[in-house]
Amino acid sequence: MSCQRSYTTAEKLKVVRYAQAHGNRAASHEFDDIAESNIRLWRRQKEHLQALPRMKMAKRGKGAAYPELEAKLNEWIEERRQQGSGVSIAEVRMKALTIAKTCTNIARFKASYGWGDQFMNRHGLLVRHQTTIVQKLPMVSDTKLLQFQKKGFLKCSIFNTMDGSEDDALWMDPRDNKSAEGELPECEEDNDLYYLD
């Protein structure tokens, strides 16, 4: 008895071609004793296998239980993304419930969190928001960055603000012993000086 092994679509189609020419039993002996029942199954699925990617191992997972609903929902998501908006799984679930009410052949649809997650996976969708407003850096940030890379910085003088008002000590040259205000902030030890040469 051989161990179970999974086969790619290309391998399955190769076995099917050999089986059509020489028979299922000969194909079983030729390709490492593949079970004849698998070969019969692959021969029945030949058209389906030809449509799959060649390196795909199997078609696992269930298909959509409500394909009409999922098609409409997918269109809605694409419209939202064209407008620059992202969607969350909660929004997908709420919209799916409203679409389900308009469809005639859908009964007892619940739109659970698991369904929403599987829907996103089936359609290759990710939960991410496109930002339209971003924080702009000050105009002098490029020159300050170049100065910083050339000169150096004091480890103990880094402030935690983004507006540029209190971070002058970060952009000073410790070799000149003066900051933008004209004075050098004090450090505990001399080894707190770091240079980026």
Image (cartoon, helix red, strand yellow):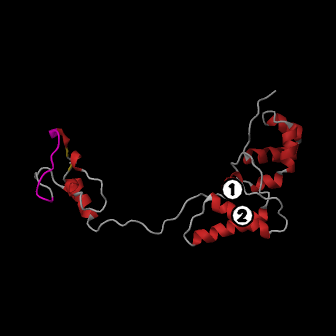
- On screen, residue 51 versus residue 172, left or right, reads right
The location of residue 56, given as percent across then percent down, is 70, 48
Q: Position of residue 153 (x, y in %)?
A: 21, 50
Place residue 92 in its image quadrant: bottom right
Residue at 85% across / 42% down in the picture?
39
Q: Quadrant of the N terminus?
A: top right
**Circle 1 residue:** 116
Marks 2 & 1, CB-CB < 8 Å contact: yes
* Residue 187 counted in the magenta span: yes
Write down the quadrant of residue 172 in the picture: bottom left
Is the residue marked by circle 1 packed among few (<14), some (14-19), or many (20+) residues within 10 Å? some
SS at badge 1: helix
Relative to 13, is 145 above or below? Answer: below
Count of all numbered marks drawn on residues in the image: 2
Q: Is residue 25 left or right of residue 68?
A: right
Q: Amino acid at mark 2?
A: Ala
Residue 61 picture location, percent across and down = 75, 49
Where residue 194 sits: x, y (%)? Answer: 20, 44
Residue type (three-letter) at the residue carrying disc 1: Gly
Distance (Cα) linking label 2 and label 1: 9 Å
Q: Which residue is mark 2?
A: 96
Binning the other alpha carbons within 10 Å of mark 2 as few (below 14), some (14 to 19) or many (20 upward) gives many
Q: Does 136 sit left or right of 196 as displayed?
A: right
**Quick one: 30 or 131, which is closer to the camera?**
131
Q: Magenta part of the protein: which range?
A: 180-190
Task: Write the residue at 84% across / 61% down.
Answer: 107
